[in-house]
Image: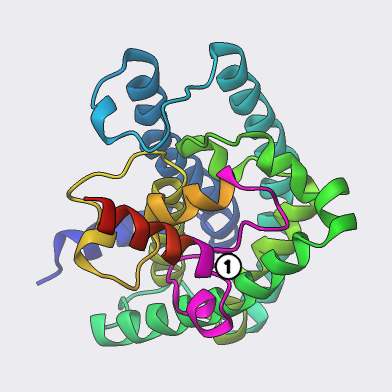
């Protein structure tokens, strides 16, 4: 007997082509998850709700928020969407499929773990490179226009950076050619993670409180507050790369001082 998930998937593959699902479908899924998870933080910042959990006291003006959303829509339609369309043949060549049956959860989880590890490694070094003087001035400084980040600023970046660091996200799936379901799940998790890392709020229920290796908002907010040559905390999802290469020393020292003062 088919599960609800399988029946839903059967509807998709019956009514839409692989190309439509992998390109347009992926884009619509990304936009839905990104804005639905990111917009609530604008509401929190504007209304002052849950302000005791806000990491920085400073808030963004409505004009700054509007600028972010306008640029995001431009970049998403003019950069993200074309990339999804153009990359479809590559994923198909590497074995991506959408047919039933869906992959087992064992396969899905093992692939997701590999994707996170690979993405962390590639993103860390790419991010460090973007903090060199020339690339920061001409490319990465766009993302750092928001020293007080909120959820949607996670994807506010120069088009060149979108392509450069986006490579870290797609390299795992591009190599393994996963089922489209796995690709969508991976994309959803990455969007939720990066929105949370930029949300500007350190909640008691944040995943970083449960899993110490997870970076989260407090870890990445430190990166946005400091001068680009001294910020550190370059990691994507998990923090082990910064720990291994000593680029989180300033952050760890600050947390130690805060702990001692309490």
Q: Looking at the image, which is closer to me, 19 or 28?
A: 28
Identify the colour scheme used: rainbow
Q: Quadrant of residue 65?
A: top right
Please tell me which residue is depicted at 45% across the width and 79% down the height of the picture. Answer: 240
Q: Which residue is mark 1?
A: 169
Of residues 139 and 95, the one nearer the viewer is 139
Tell me the residue at 56%/38% (across/down). 153
Up-down relation of residue 29 to residue 254 (above or below): above
Is residue 35 at all visible to an observer of this figure?
yes
130 lies above or below 139: below
Chief SS of the magenta region: loop
- Asked if residue 93 is positioned above or below residue 187 in the image, the reply reads below
Tell me the quarter of the image containing the N terminus.
bottom left
Where is residue 239 drawn, in percent x and y? 44, 72
Q: Which residues are magenta?
A: 225-250
210 sits to left or right of 152:
left
Which residue is nearer to you in this view: 248 or 211? 248
Give the secondary structure at mark 1. helix
Picture coordinates of residue 195, whole percent (x, y): 44, 46
The quadrant where residue 167 appears: bottom right
Could you tell me which residue is drawn at 42 percent across and 36 percent down?
Answer: 38
**Residue placed farthest to the left in the image?**
1
Apparent side of residue 149 relative to residue 45 in the rendered image (left or right): right
In the rendered view, does 86 fall on the left or right side of 122?
right
Please check the rendered image and state whether residue 131 is part of the magenta-colored stretch, yes or no: no
What x and y, as percent, mark residue 125? 68, 74
Residues 169 and 7: in front is 169
Q: Is residue 188 visible?
A: no
Q: Residue 234: within the magenta?
A: yes
């Amino acid at each position: 007997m088919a599960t609800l998930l399988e029946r839903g998937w059967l509807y998709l593959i019956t009514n839409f082509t692989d190309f439509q699902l992998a390109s347009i479908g992926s884009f619509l899924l990304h936009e839905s998850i990104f804005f639905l998870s990111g917009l609530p933080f604008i509401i929190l910042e504007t209304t002052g709700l849950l302000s005791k959990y806000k990491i920085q006291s400073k808030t963004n003006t409505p004009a700054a928020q509007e600028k972010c959303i306008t640029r995001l829509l431009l970049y998403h339609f003019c950069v993200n969407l074309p990339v999804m369309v153009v990359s479809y043949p590559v994923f198909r060549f590497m074995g991506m499929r959408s047919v039933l049956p869906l992959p087992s959860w064992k396969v899905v989880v093992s692939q997701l773990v590999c994707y996170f590890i690979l993405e962390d490694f590639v993103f860390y070094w790419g991010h460090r490179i973007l903090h060199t003087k020339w690339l920061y001035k001409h490319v990465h400084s766009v993302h750092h226009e928001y020293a007080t980040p909120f959820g949607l600023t996670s994807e506010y970046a120069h088009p060149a950076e979108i392509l450069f660091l986006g490579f870290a996200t797609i390299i795992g799936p591009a190599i393994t050619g996963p089922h489209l379901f796995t690709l969508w799940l991976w994309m959803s998790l990455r969007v939720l993670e990066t929105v949370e890392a930029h949300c500007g709020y350190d909640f008691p229920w944040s995943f970083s409180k449960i899993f110490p290796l997870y970076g989260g908002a407090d870890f990445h907010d430190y990166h946005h507050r400091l001068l680009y040559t001294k910020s550190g905390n370059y990691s994507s999802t998990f923090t082990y790369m910064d720990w291994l290469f000593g680029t989180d020393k300033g952050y760890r020292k600050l947390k130690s001082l805060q702990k001692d003062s309490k």
